[in-house]
Structure formats: C-alpha cells, structure tokens
Amino acid sequence: MSKKMPISVTVNGQTHDLLAEPRELLIYVLRERLDITGPHVGCETSHCGACTVLMDGKSVKACTVFAAQANGASITTVEGLGTPDSLHALQRSFREHHGLQCGYCTPGMITRAAKLLEENPTPTEAEVRFGMAGNLCRCTGYQNIVKSILAAADEMNAEQEVAE
Amino acid sequence: MIPTAFDYHRPTDLESVISLLETHGDEARVLAGGHSLIPMMKLRMADVGHLIDLQDVSGLQEVTVAGSQVTLGAMVTQHALIDHAELASVAPLIREAALEIADPQVRYMGTVGGNLANGDPGNDMPGIMQCLDASILLQGPEGERTVAARDYYEAAYMTERRDDEVLVSVRFEAPSGGHAYVKQKRKIGDYATAAAAVVLTRAGDAVGSASIAMTNLSDTPVWSEAAGRALIGSACDEAAVKAAVDAMLGDIEPYESNHGPVEFKRHAAASVLTRAIARAWERA
Ligand SMILES: Cc1cc2nc3c(=O)[nH]c(=O)nc-3n(C[C@H](O)[C@H](O)[C@H](O)COP(=O)(O)OP(=O)(O)OC[C@H]3O[C@@H](n4cnc5c(N)ncnc54)[C@H](O)[C@@H]3O)c2cc1C
Ligand code: FES
Ligand code: FES
C-alpha cells in the first residue's frame, strides 16, 4: 500500500474531495467511491471504450487514467449529459433507432458520440464510424449505433437552427 | 488489474523533473499520456516506484512552425497533431500518420514524445521521424543534447536516452514533394503488421530524392537508405519500385508474432512500400 493522497475531481458539475491511492484507476474512483456507475468496465485493457468519459474536454478511457492524474480535472459521464426526465438528443436517438441491445457499451458510446458531435456537428457516416472506432459493441453490429448518431446530429442541428 | 503502488509526482518545470529522475534513478519513470506505460504497469510488466507526471510541466505542449522548420513539444498529443491546420499544410505526413495511430480516445492522451520515447517497435512515430531525418532533443542534468532519430533506437525498448534525461521535443525540416504513410493493420487500434513511410521529390521526370522508413519489421524502426537510393534518378517505374522493395527487404528482420509469420510480414512489407511509393510519387 502506498500513501493515499487528497484528490479533488469535479464530476458532472459537482466537486468531490476524497483520499485515494495514486494508482487507483479513475473508473473505480467513479464507480466504487462516487457511485457514478454509468461508465462501465468492459475489457479493462484500454480497448473497448465502455469506460469512456470526458476529462477536461477529451474523450478518455477511464480504465487507463490514474486517480492521481485526474486530480483537479473536470469530468462528464453519461449521467451528466441528460436525465431520465430530460434525455440528451443522443439518448433519445439511441432509444428510437435501436442503437443498443444489452446496453453495456451504451454509456461509453453516447459519451464518446457527444464529444464527436461537438467537434464535428455534421459528420458523414464514414466520419462517425472513424470517430467511434474506440468503442466496441458485441451486440448491434454497429449499424443502428451509426444511424442513431447521425439522426441525433440532424436533430441537434435542427434545434440549433430554431434557437437562432 | 491494479499496478504495484508508486509515489506520484506532478512537477511544473523540467528542472524539477530532472532532479526527481536523478534522485530516484531507475526507480523513476516519467508519465506522458500513459497509454503505453499504464497498460504495462497494470500487467505488472513495468514496476515503477516513482511516477513523474509531465502534464503540468511548462514548455512541452507547443507545436512551432517557422517556415519549413517544425518543432513538436514532447507533450503534444496525437489528437492535437491531427487538429493543427498549419502543421497539416506544412507537413501532411504527420497528420496522415497520426490518423493511423490507435483510436480516438487513445489519441487524446497519447503524446508524440511518449510515442518516440517508448521504444516499442510497433510505435508509428519513430519510423516517421526517421523518414523525415528528425532530431530529438533530450535534456538531462548535464544540459541539452540532440540525437538524430535515425541513431536513436538501439533495440526494442532500448534507446539513446539515459534514465535521467527527458525527451523535450522533436524537430525536422518539412519535406517538399510527395509523402505517404501506408500501414497494414488488422483493425483500428492495432499496431502495424507492416508500415511504410515515404517522402520523395520529383526532378523533371525522375525521382530527385527519396527517404524510406519501415515500422514493426525489426526490433527497431528501419530507415532503409538503400531503398531510397534505388529510387533516385529513376522514373519511379515498376523496375525501380521493385528494386527499392528488394533493397528494403534486405534491411528488415521481422520476427514471428501474433501479426503473423515472417514470410507473411515480408509480403506485407513489400505491399505497403509499393503502395506508399506510388502514392508519394502521385503527390510529388
Ligand atoms: C488500444 C491502444 C492502441 C494503440 N495503438 C497504437 C498504434 O497503432 N500505434 C502507436 O504508435 N501507438 C499505439 N498505441 C500507443 C499509444 O500511441 C501511446 O500513447 C504511445 O505509444 C505512448 O505515448 P504516451 O504519451 O501515452 O506515453 P506513456 O505511456 O506515458 O510513456 C511511454 C514510455 O515513454 C516514456 N516517456 C514518455 N514521455 C517521455 C518523455 N517526454 N521523455 C522521456 N521519456 C518519456 C515513459 O516513461 C514510458 O516509458 C496504442 C495504445 C493503446 C492503448
Ligand atoms: S474498460 Fe476501459 S477500454 Fe475497456
Ligand atoms: S449493446 Fe450490447 S455491447 Fe453494445
């Protein structure tokens, strides 16, 4: 055991102060200490993207970030994107277009897609596939995930136009 | 998958990093994006007593383009390389290669310095930097020194960098003419089965200059001087390309791995280089 260090992370707008060993992985800080269980553990080896969160504006795999590295960071998980009463456009779209089956990969998919659409609000299908390549799904065959993201992009752009 | 315990340091300047490296010797490692080191620590294949996080160290994050002189700070991420419009126009080979590395999430964290310092033969940037004849800037207790990328790699995970030195930046002259990076991999997020980096120039109807480097086909990247020489002065016709490929095949020493047996890798090496030369010539 090494010494614990004070860690402060802001998750979905709320700041948490805790003591953690530097080697703890961010995914376990979120899931086991803060009870934020949207991000999942799929492979634990940096491949599947089920653990994807936004950290200081980057899509990252939370199984490959030490707690110590995340000290001071601002993190968004799927819980921070929408609520059951007010779903994010991506969440509505995944439901409508059957972008999930078992749902295990879905929080990572949606969190990654949110960043992708922020950087590229009008992606082509090829750009969606390339931009989502760090997230694996064992159920859907991806077709409906891509469809959901493209439909959400259209909806978000239409909302944007109405707002302007 | 929890690594052994370590002490964590997050200094804000290079001098402090170097003095921590001096104090803790080979117990200490720097952490850049962590996307090679953390997986190794989780597998307990790397045992690190003191981890020195570079994320807050000033002066390592810059991309500088001054005419054709390009300098990339060690902590510039692969994502930032892709996103940099001026870099993409001056040295498009960098963007083409960065897009072939790992997957989107890994590219937000993985850095050019980490990719170069790591020494895994599968890393893509070492071959790119050998192709460009880049210089790697190291800083240690005795000050700065520069090592040519072509002299930097000794064996897998063995480089010219001493334990108490930090890789600060990499610098190169942006090439004129055509470029290509062609990487054969099994899926996105996979290391190369074989990859070829080519830059060449056109002099009239002939090849004026050519530089060729190969990735993951030996225990270091391979800059094949002979392959480049085989193209120079030729019309880049089939015979010249074949001569270049044959010369390259004489310089690589692939070993069997989960990417396939040796013969398959030699076959893949020949095809990626053939394609890369054609693409670079088209663009020259
Ligand atoms: C799923 C996955 C797929 C990947 N696919 C590819 C791929 O296709 N191609 C590819 O090239 N890479 C690939 N990578 C590796 C990735 O690009 C790494 O990020 C990169 O190799 C290392 O950069 P880093 O910043 O993460 O370094 P780290 O992991 O932090 O460090 C790697 C090593 O370099 C040392 N180091 C780092 N920075 C410095 C410095 N400035 N000075 C001295 N030493 C330093 C560290 O001490 C450590 O030993 C992949 C990784 C993953 C997880
Ligand atoms: S659990 Fe993190 S990438 Fe699979
Ligand atoms: S819906 Fe089951 S893994 Fe994607």
Image (cartoon, rainbow, N blue to C red):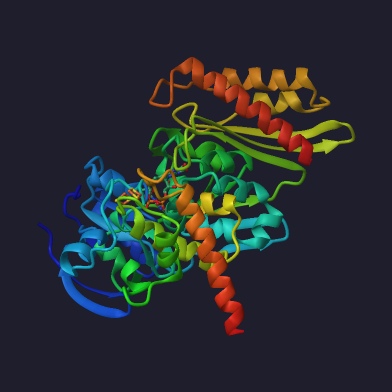
Judge left or right: residue B48 versus residue A82: left
* Residue toward you, B24 or B67: B67
Quadrant showing the C terminus of chain A? bottom right
Residue A52 in the image, given as x and y percentages of width and height: 35, 58
Judge left or right: residue B199 versus residue B201: left
Quadrant showing the N terminus of chain A? bottom left
Relative to B51, say whether B119 is above or below. Answer: above
* Residue toward you, B152 or A50: A50
Report how many numbered discs are placed on residues in the image. Answer: 0
Instruction: Check the image and name the residue furthest to the right.
Output: B204
Residue B108 in the image, given as x and y percentages of width and height: 45, 58
Relative to B32, say whether B258 is above or below. Answer: above
Residue B65 in the image, given as x and y percentages of width and height: 66, 61
> Which residue lies at the image location 58% right of the left edge and 41% below the top edge?
B128
* Residue toward you, B39 or A116: A116
Corner quadrant of residue A94: bottom left
Residue B104, can we see it?
A: yes
Corner quadrant of residue B234: top right
Judge left or right: residue A127 versus residue A47: right
Residue A79 in the image, given as x and y percentages of width and height: 31, 70
Judge left or right: residue A40 versus residue B269: left
Relative to B211, say whether B148 is above or below. Answer: below
Residue B60, can we see it?
A: no
